[in-house]
Image: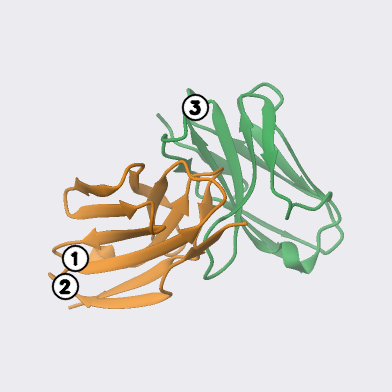
Chain colours: A orange, B green
Amino acid sequence: GQNIDQPTEMTATEGAIVQINCTYQTSGFNGLFWYQQHAGEAPTFLSYNVLDGLEEKGRFSSFLSRSKGYSYLLLKELQMKDSASYLCAVRRGMRFGAGTRLTVKP
Amino acid sequence: DTGVSQDPRHKITKRGQNVTFRCDPISEHNRLYWYRQTLGQGPEFLTYFQNEAQLEKSRLLSDRFSAERPKGSFSTLEIQRTEQGDSAMYLCASSLTGELQPQHFGDGTRLSIL
């Protein structure tokens, strides 16, 4: 079976840094993806990790530890528009966690 | 690149009716996926196609659900004898072949069962 866990909600301040964690247990693993989904909109791709370590992409970075079944998404210099749900997904087919709803406050 | 398009955007129907949704993927994408999403949850995988072949189907998908991709381009998802629990957003996504290819999502079809 597969289990993907993320915190349900997080709040952070504009300009700050926030880390969204994801833990997973799967019977197979081909990569871990992060998607952003604004309310009422489709998910949009942010990043993926296949090997252990940190992948940086502008204000967004994602980290993976396969041995620990753990990933995080790091958002720097938070902006109000970053308020959204952040979905962690494991690539086997594509299985999504329930998402973390991030609220950025001024 | 016009993106993934889904039709209709909204569908309201009575319980027991059949509904069919259409998805047009990005033209060069071989893979096409269907998901269902309810409020506060992540997308739930339903099925996916590699060209016209349906390669995987979720065990959660009852036999009232059927999907086709006859020519390897657009796809349809049909739900027969709809039930209240079928109310959800139905998302379609497409990608190039390869496990590391990101999926591009359409805006979804919101189904409401009365």
Determine contact: label 1, label 2, CB under 8 Å: yes
On the picture, is B69 further left or further right than A56?
right
Label 3 to label 2: alpha-carbon separation? 38 Å
Identify which amino acid the numbered label 1 is placed on: Gln
Residue assigned mark 2: A14
Which chain letter matches label 2?
A
Q: What residue type is labelled 2?
A: Glu
At numbered mark 2, what does the secondary structure look like: helix, strand or loop?
loop
| Relative image position of residue B13 (x, y in whole percent) | 76, 60
- Check disc 3 and give the amino acid type: Thr
Given residues B44 and A83, the one toward you in this image is: B44
Question: In the image, what residue occupies the spot 83% across and 51% down?
Answer: B64
* Local crowd size for mark 1, using a 10 Å CA cut-off: few (<14), some (14–19), many (≥20): some
Left or right of A58, for residue A6: right
Mark 3 — on which chain does it sit?
Answer: B
State the residue at coordinates (81%, 64%). Answer: B83
Q: Mark 3 points at which residue?
A: B97
Query: Disc 1 is attached to a residue of which chain?
Result: A
Label 2 Cα neighbours within 10 Å, binned few <14 / some 14-19 / many ≥20: some
Kind of element beneath mark 1: loop
